[in-house]
Amino acid sequence: MKILIVLTYYRPNISGLTIYAERLAKAFVAKGHEVTVLTSRFDRSLPLEETQDGVRIVRAPVWFRVSKGVIMPTIGVLASRLVKETDVVQLHLPQFDAAGIAIRGRILKKPTITTYHCDLLMPAGVMSKAANWGVDLMNLITAVFSHRIVTYTQDYADHSAYLRGFHSKVKIVPPPVVLPKASPNEIQEFRLLHNPNNYHPVIGMAARFATEKGVEVLLHALPAVLAKYPNAKVQFVGPYENIIGEEQYLKRLMPVIEKYQLNGNWEFLGSLDPKAMAVFYPNIDVLVVPSLNSTEAFGLVQIEAMMNGIPCATSNLPGVRQPVKIHSMGQIFEIGDSEGLAKSILTILRSQSEQAAKEKRDFSCYDPASVAQKYEVLFKQIDNELHQEK
């Protein structure tokens, strides 16, 4: 089967959406499918076309940006050619260009599935608001012309105004989550490199340094944690500098962060590859996910942490709260509540039961091969429906 996957940002970009698409693409390749990814050439140093891990990547040149969005004049031409060549289309929202591709898929009778990752909320500003309205409209058109809409959890589907409008099309498929195996020596080497003075406990946060991630919620929670554990340390994993649309957010919070850095209570680890992430999780005591709004719909890092026996302190957002609820590994606090986050962290640190019971938990539903198989079933269902229409 020839599969066309379309999203705005693919590797080397780092985001939950990008990682999801990459894992799914590789899983399809492993099953013997031909996979093409159509995406933006958001960095001019990237080639217009290349193959990585068996996945063909086609990048449309970017004319200019509107906040986090990109304008690609040639994507329509590329999409017309690639949709004709493919058997099925898989789109990832939010994405401004998805509507035109969904229409092409419907006209050419190609099974078209849209994966809805989260809502899009642009930063303040007239241009950003206009862009947000435009993307919302394109997302709506995409849903109308898609045969199915996949999202991670029923919880998110039930609370999303967008998804509630297309209830009959919505299918729940867990996200793909996988990490390389890490040896005890590799885990120890990571600790010696990043925590040689044995700061304890270690609080992990893995995210882009972005407004919706709620970094300030963690910053405001730290005094209460440090009052109990003066040698606590935050290790922040993920890009934090030169993030499009988030420069002022970093500038606003850095004076507070720098004070914690001086005392050794905060460390930026930067972006880590999957192998490094596999040794990061065993070196922390708790992972925090203080996300603030519906631009976060699950938090793949929670499952990665839980696979390593690490509990999570998570905000009470639809979808985001589900990993803790499903796997009973951590605490949930109210959105934006720093005191609640501090209490959740302290509660987790007092209890070791989550880690002791990790062998009893089943994470097989997140295996990329299992997730890819669920998509295959949906593609076949749609294909059968299209043949019956003839």
Image (spheres, rainbow, N blue to C red):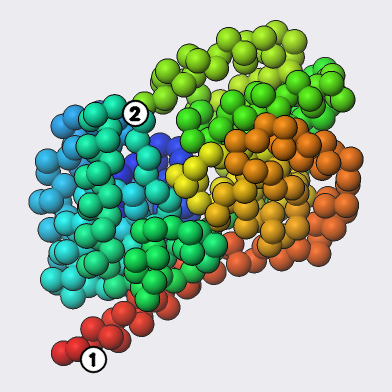
The answer to whether residue 93 is left or right of residue 320 is: left
Query: In the rendered image, which residue does mark 2 sit on?
Result: 124
Could you say which disc has been placed on residue 17 in the image? Answer: none
Place residue 264 in its image quadrant: top right
Query: Taking 7 as reference, is 90 above or below it?
Result: below
Residue occupying image coordinates x 25% and y 44%: 133
Q: Is residue 329 left or right of residue 278?
A: right
Amino acid type, residue under disc 2 in the picture: Ala
| Location of residue 219 (image quadrant) | top right
Which residue is at 30% across, 86% downward? 384
Q: Is 34 in front, or is 22?
A: 22
Q: Give x and y (percent) for residue 148.
A: 34, 71
Q: Residues within 10 Å of mark 1 (few under 14, many from 20)?
A: few
- For the image, the number of numbered tags is 2
Q: Which mark is residue 388?
A: 1
Left or right of residue 196, residue 166 in this image: left
